């Protein structure tokens, strides 16, 4: 069961953000901005803000699947792309992989990513874990 949220507070957040199915690049950019704003809050996000963040990420992912289909991108290439986008070095993934050598092997396509690691990477990068499997 998920974390309880204050429905009135969540309703106010929804009313101020107005998330909806994305149909235009302008709406896509607007929701990306809102997601980044909430991501910047980090641990200070309330449970209501976390629920809103998850909703907007789902809307963005749905739009991206249709507008920017990726085809079959190997998991290690997706990982390197996401790391590059965040200017993240391999050491930043130590909490997930626990070994520099293992991270290097994964990034070079020499080792696979387990389901548990894919789930952790999905949470870390705010994407579906499926992109790593």
Image (cartoon, rainbow, N blue to C red):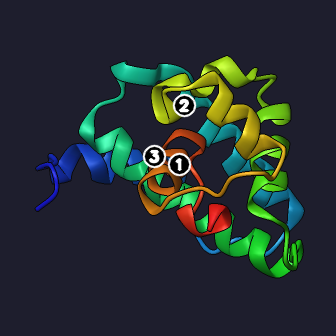
Whole-number angstrom distance, CA of label 3 to CA of label 2: 17 Å
Return the mark for residue 92. Answer: none
Judging depth in this view, the residue of 1 and 100 nearest the camera is 100
- Secondary structure at badge 1 equals helix
- Secondary structure at badge 2 equals helix
Circles 2, 1 touching at the beta carbon (< 8 Å)? no
> Which residue is at 69% across, 52% downward?
111
Q: Quadrant of the C terminus?
A: bottom right
Judging depth in this view, the residue of 53 and 113 nearest the camera is 113
Q: Nearer the observer, disc 2 or disc 1? A: 2
Q: Residues within 10 Å of mark 1 (few under 14, many from 20)?
A: some
Whole-number angstrom distance, CA of label 3 to CA of label 1: 28 Å
Q: Which residue is mark 3?
A: 120
The picture places residue 26, in percent across and down from the top left corner, at: 85, 57
- State left or right for residue 54 relative to residue 87: left
The picture places residue 123, in percent across and down from the top left corner, at: 47, 46
Q: Which residue is mark 2?
A: 39
* Badge 2 or badge 1: first in the primary sequence: 1
Q: Quadrant of the N terminus?
A: bottom left
> Which residue is at 45% across, 55% downward?
119
* Badge 3 or badge 1: first in the primary sequence: 1
> Which residue is at 67% across, 28% downward?
101
Judging depth in this view, the residue of 93 and 53 nearest the camera is 93
> Which residue is at 28% across, 49% downward?
10
Q: Residues within 10 Å of mark 3 (few under 14, many from 20)?
A: some
- Secondary structure at badge 3 equals helix
Q: Nearer the observer, disc 3 or disc 1? A: 3
Return the mark for residue 17. Answer: 1
The picture places residue 66, in percent across and down from the top left corner, at: 80, 81
């Amino acid at each position: 069961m998920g974390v309880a949220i204050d429905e009135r507070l969540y309703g106010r957040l929804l009313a101020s953000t107005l998330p909806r199915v994305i149909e235009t690049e302008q709406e896509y950019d607007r929701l990306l901005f809102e997601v980044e704003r909430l991501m910047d809050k980090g641990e200070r996000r309330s449970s209501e803000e976390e629920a809103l963040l998850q909703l907007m990420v789902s809307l963005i992912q749905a739009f991206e699947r249709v507008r920017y289909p990726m085809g079959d991108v190997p998991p290690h290439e997706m990982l390197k792309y996401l790391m590059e986008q965040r200017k993240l070095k391999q050491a930043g993934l130590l909490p997930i992989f626990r070994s520099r050598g293992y991270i290097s092997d994964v990034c070079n396509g020499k080792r696979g990513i387990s389901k548990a690691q894919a789930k952790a990477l999905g949470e870390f990068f705010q994407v579906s874990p499926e992109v790593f499997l």
